[in-house]
Image (cartoon, helix red, strand yellow):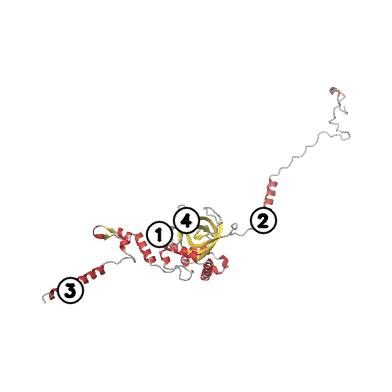
Amino acid sequence: MGNRPIRILCAVGALILAWELSVINALQPLPTFARDQADDPAEENRQEGSGGMRRPLTEDEMVEQRRQELLLDFNDPPSLDHGESVHPRLMQTVKDNTIGVRYEEREAYLRVLRLASEVPLRRQEQFAAEIRAERRTLNPSYKRRRPDEFPQFADLFTHPEFYRGRPVTLRGVMRKLTKFELGKNKLGLDEAYEGWVYTSDSQGNPAVVIFTSKDDQLPVNGDIQEEVEFTGYYFKMYGYDAQDVTRKAPMLLAGEVKWIPHPYKSAYKPLGFMWYFLASLGFLLTGYLVWQANRKELPRRPPLEIEPDFRHFPPMEHPAPNPLLPRSMTETEDS
C-alpha cells in the first residue's frame, strides 16, 4: 500500500513525458519531398554556422525545388488524350525565351521526346491538321487562303501559347544537322539529332527540331541543303546566340524526320516563256542601238586625177616595162 502513490506519480510523469515528445515531433518541419532529408546532399549543404541554422535558398535551388515538387511524384502518362497534347503539368517547368534547354526542363524534354517517338506519326499529323483547321477558323485573314497556303511557321512564331505541347507539321530546307548524346536517363534514350529548318514563310528565321530517327541518306553535316518534312510537339521558344545578338526559334520534339529525296524547289514560281522572250528581245534591241551609236562611216574614195585608158590592158598611164629593151629606152606609147 505504501508504494501505490509512487506508482501513480510515475504513471502521471510518463504520460506527461509522452505528451511533450509528441508535441516536439509535431513542431519538427516535415521533409520537402517524399524522401528522407538526410539523403539529400543539397539539404546537408544548407546546414551552416553554429546551431544548424539554414541559409536562404538561392534562385537556382528554388527553381530546382519547384521542379522536383512538380515532377518527382509525376507518375501520370505524358499525354492524357492519346498524343493530341502533352500533359499540362509536365509543361509547367518549361520557360520560353531562354538559352538552350535548362536543367529544370530536362525531365519534360526527355519525356516529350519519348512521347513523340511512341505516338504513331500518322496520328500526330492528323492532330496537327486539326489544329491548323482550328487556327483558320479563329483568324479571319486565314480563311481567305487555301489550306495549303496556311503560314504555319509565322502563326507558330507569333502565337506560341496556342501550340504549347501540341503537334505541329513543318516543311522546309534543313541547313544544319548534328548528332549528340542525351546523357544518362531512365527512358532508354541514348542519342538524338538536332536540325535547323527554314520554311518558305519563316523569312530567314529557323525552326529547331530534335528527333531520334532519320533516313540513312540524310547526311549529318553543318552545311547541307535538304528538303524535309516533320511533325513534332512544340516545346518552347529556344534562345540562341547569333553573332552579337540573341535570337529565338521555335523548338519542336519529333520522333522522325521525312527526307524528300530531290533538289529543293524554290518557293517562287519560275518565269514563263513570255518573260524569256521579252528579255531576249530587249537584249537584241539594246545591242542594235549600241551598234548604231558606235558605227563610223567609211571615208569616200577620192576621184582619180588621170582618166585611165581602158582600151589597152593594162591602162596606159601605168604601162608595163618591156623586158627586151634597156631600162633607159623604156617609154610609154604616148611618148
**Distance Cα–Cα, label 3 vs label 2:** 111 Å
Amino acid residing under circle 2: Tyr
Q: CA distance from mark 2 to mark 1?
A: 57 Å
Q: Are marks 2 and 4 in contact (CB under 8 Å)?
A: no
**Circle 3 sits on which residue?**
11
Asked if labels 4 and 1 touch by Cβ distance under 8 angstroms, the answer is no
How far, Cα to Cα, is label 2 from label 4?
A: 48 Å
Query: Which label sits on residue 166?
Result: none
Give neighbour class at mark 2: few <14, some 14-19, many 20+ (Cα, 10 Å): few
Say above or below: 71 vs 2: above
Task: Say which element carries label 4.
Answer: strand
Local secondary structure at mark 2: helix
Instruction: Name the residue located 37 percent from the left edge and 64 percent from the top edge.
Output: 68
Q: Is residue 174 above or below residue 26?
A: above
First in sequence: mark 3 vs mark 1: 3
Kind of residue at disc 3: Ala
Q: Earlier in the sequence, mark 3 or mark 2?
A: 3
Circle 4 residue: 180
Between 205 and 186, which is closer to the camera in this rendering?
186
Q: Residues within 10 Å of mark 4 (few under 14, many from 20)?
A: few
Residue 218: where, in percent of width, then height? Answer: 55, 56
In-front residue for pair 296/160: 160
**Sequence-wise, which precedes: disc 2 or disc 4?**
4
In the image, 133: left or right of 187?
right
Nearer the observer: mark 4 or 3; the answer is 3
Of helix, strand and loop, which one carries label 1?
helix
What residue would you read off at disc 2? 276
State which mark lies toward you, 2 or 4: 4
Can residue 159 be seen here? no
